[in-house]
Image (cartoon, coloured by chain):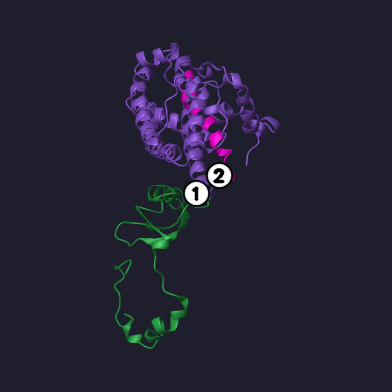
Chain colours: A green, B purple
Amino acid sequence: MNDWPLWEVFIRSQHGLAHKHAGSLHAPDAEMAIKNARDVYTRRNEGVSIWVVKSSDITASSPGEKEPLFEPANSKVYRHPTFYDVPEEVKNL
Amino acid sequence: MPTIQLFEYLLRLGDNCLILSQRLSEWCGHGPVLEEDIALTNIALDLLGHARFWLSYAGEVEGAGRDEDKLAFLRDAGQFRNVLLVEQPNGDYAMTTARQFFFDAWHLHLLNALGRSSDSRVAAIAEKAAKEVTYHLERSTDWVIRLGDGTPESHRRMQAAVDEMWIYTGELFEMDAVDVEMVQSGIGVDLATLQSRWTEHVEKTFGEATLQIPAENWMQQGGKRGLHGEKLGYLLAEMQFLQRAYPGAQW
């Protein structure tokens, strides 16, 4: 069982929302990964949809590149949409 | 329709779920991987829920003041009405999988048929349970295929497990006087009619799993009449210990 690949699990908690990373698990193939995700991550009615993707298929940014990647955005406060009021009725913005 | 027959019938439905649930619970904390540990205990909890519905109803039908807990914890082995298949020990993961697969494939068809019962309470319980059992069968079918068509070692173990559990599958379709009575009153299911669909699913799955259907025709029976193997006693000793040692204990 140690050679089972690792899968990243994404759950959509309700219709209209995006899938969110829930965690990871081991499974022999994609179909079993969905079933395992159902059992491990949706036991308390958390989801309406599940995605799984092999962890090895994810390309991640390197922590060492933090500065060149993210530093330039730090000084640009005007990019944050904080200069107008959001009506109370608008949820999940 | 005699009450005693319905009581007996409900005990069989409830005891199948209760005993298999207890067996699966034995895996809690011992699963081969975390994911399987959680999956098996989920199924155990589903089955325990079904057992509670059936045994509560059985207690009401009997009308002797026994509730689900009294029926679960204060009966001895000879009074249990589960089929022999569900009391078989867990063994290795292939044994647990074979037992679950044979049971699920039967259980789902049984519940679908009971959904059309003339007894509205039986129909309602069956309909609710069938949704969960649909998933149980998908899962156990997937595992039979993956272990059967896996490595030489997993194939060998899966075939051995199928051979070991096979003699307990005949009882699933055995009709006795209680079953006949229940069919005539429109409450129960003619078990013999489930066999062709069960066999079809088993054959199709074994085809994909590269497993052989055992040639053995002799079938072990008796569980439905209270004739159980020795190992059920050990299971009950663990399950019932608290209520036996501390009668009426609550938390």
> What is the number of the mark on residue B46?
none
Which element type, helix, strand or loop, lies under badge 2?
A: loop
Asked whether the beta carbons under mark 1 and mark 2 sit within 8 Å of each other, the answer is yes
Q: Farthest residue in the right direction?
A: B245
> Residue A79 sits in which quadrant?
bottom left
In the image: residue B130, left or right of residue B46: left
In this view, the residue farthest toward the front is B152
What's the chain of the residue with tag 2?
Answer: B
Residue that numbered label 2 is attached to: B31
Q: Amino acid at mark 2?
A: Gly
Give percent across and percent down for residue A60: 41, 70
Stretch in magenta: B8-30
Q: Residue B52 location in percent, x, y?
A: 49, 32
Badge 1: chain ID? B
Above/below status of A44 relative to B247: below
| Residue at the image point whose x is 29% and y is 60% from the top | A16
Q: Amino acid at mark 1?
A: Glu
For the stretch drawn in magenta, the main secondary structure is: helix
Residue at 53% in and 48% down: B33
- Judge if badges 1 and 2 mark residues of a common chain: yes
Please give the residue where the numbered disc 1 appears in the rendered image. B35
Give the camera-side residue of B212 and A24.
B212
Instruction: Name above or below for residue A72 compared with residue B12.
Output: below
Task: Count neighbours of disc 1 (C-alpha within 10 A) and say few if under 14, some if 14 to 19, many if 20 or more.
Answer: many
The N terminus of chain B is located in which quarter? top left
